[in-house]
Image: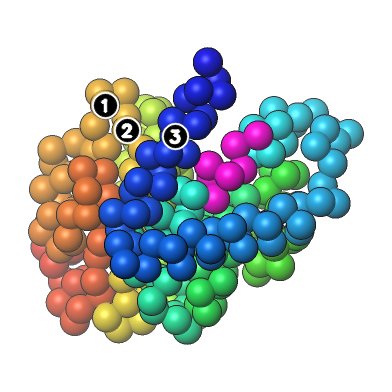
């Protein structure tokens, strides 16, 4: 049953890759095979069941690794990062680091950030030779990074108090966004945010959706793209 679901998921992933890449589908497939092989080789030194209490993370990522790589490739294609080389990118909540690794594969310069304490994530990002910052996201706390990027991404966001009573609202998001825009985003740079669904099966409240819509482009039902134009901070402040 699990294997059937896994195969179905992989088929759907390749159909999505086909729909995005179109004429370059064969090249992207060869890229995927190369990326998959590279990551597997770099992961060889990581024991599948190490001497750790967190065996669940290891088992999940080794069993589902190809699926995670496919999802990360899809994310790269959706943002045209396979066409745009030499962009400076920050991936927030990077996990095992597959997305930044694939972006680097296409010639971009990517750094990543995640909380400390997950042994597999740290071993994986080290194996993939990624520059990584350890930091817990808080809306009122600036990122520990003194540089600006062309693109800042956050996928499957959990740092916003996901499924807790501390779920971020307009105030928290306005403070957080203003800080990273002013400190870490280049002029005309972009922020891509992909949200998990909350308990009501929605990515955010109607009020928060209205807030985001005032200055961002809806990429999908749970994803938004923000461009740092000269009036962005003023619009955020006006609508918060």
**Left or right of 57 on screen, residue 79:** left
**Quick one: 55 or 171, which is closer to the camera?**
55
| Residues at discs 3 and 1 in contact (Cβ within 8 Å) | no
| Residue 166 image point, x, y percent | 38, 33
- C-alpha distance separating marks 3 and 1: 21 Å
Kindly identify which numbered label has been placed on residue 9. 3
* Discs 3/1, front: 3
Q: Determine the image quadrant of residue 76.
A: bottom left
Residue density around tag 1, few if under 14, some if 14–19, many if 20 or more, within 10 Å: few
| Residue 2 image point, x, y percent | 55, 20
- Residue at disc 3, secondary structure: helix
- Residue at disc 2, secondary structure: loop
- C-alpha distance separating marks 2 and 3: 19 Å
Q: Which residue is mark 1?
A: 201
Q: Which residue is mark 2?
A: 197
- C-alpha distance separating marks 2 and 1: 5 Å
Which residue reaches farthest top?
1
Residue at position x 56%, y 24% from top?
A: 3
Q: Is residue 240 magenta?
A: no
The stretch in magenta equals: 63-69
């Amino acid at each position: 049953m699990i294997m059937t679901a896994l195969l179905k998921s992989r088929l759907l992933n390749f159909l999505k890759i086909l729909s995005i890449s179109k004429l370059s589908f064969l090249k992207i497939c060869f890229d995927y095979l190369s990326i998959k092989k590279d990551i597997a080789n770099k992961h060889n030194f990581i024991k599948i069941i190490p001497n750790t209490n967190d065996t669940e993370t290891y088992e999940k990522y080794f069993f589902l690794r190809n699926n995670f790589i496919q999802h990360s490739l899809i994310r790269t294609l959706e943002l045209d990062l396979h066409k745009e080389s030499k962009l400076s990118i920050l991936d927030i909540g990077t996990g095992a680091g597959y997305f930044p690794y694939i972006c680097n594969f296409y010639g971009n310069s990517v750094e990543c950030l995640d909380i400390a304490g997950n042994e597999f994530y740290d071993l994986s990002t080290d194996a993939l030779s990624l520059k990584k910052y350890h930091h817990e996201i808080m809306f009122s706390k600036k990122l520990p990074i003194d540089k600006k990027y062309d693109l800042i991404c956050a996928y499957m966001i959990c740092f916003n108090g996901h499924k807790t009573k501390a779920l971020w609202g307009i105030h928290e998001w306005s403070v957080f966004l203003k800080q990273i825009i002013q400190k870490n985003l280049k002029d005309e740079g972009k922020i891509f945010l992909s949200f998990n669904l909350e308990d009501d099966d929605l990515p955010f409240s109607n009020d928060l959706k209205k807030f985001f819509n005032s200055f961002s482009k809806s990429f999908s039902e749970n994803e938004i793209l923000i461009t740092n134009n000269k009036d962005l901070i003023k619009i955020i402040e006006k609508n918060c």
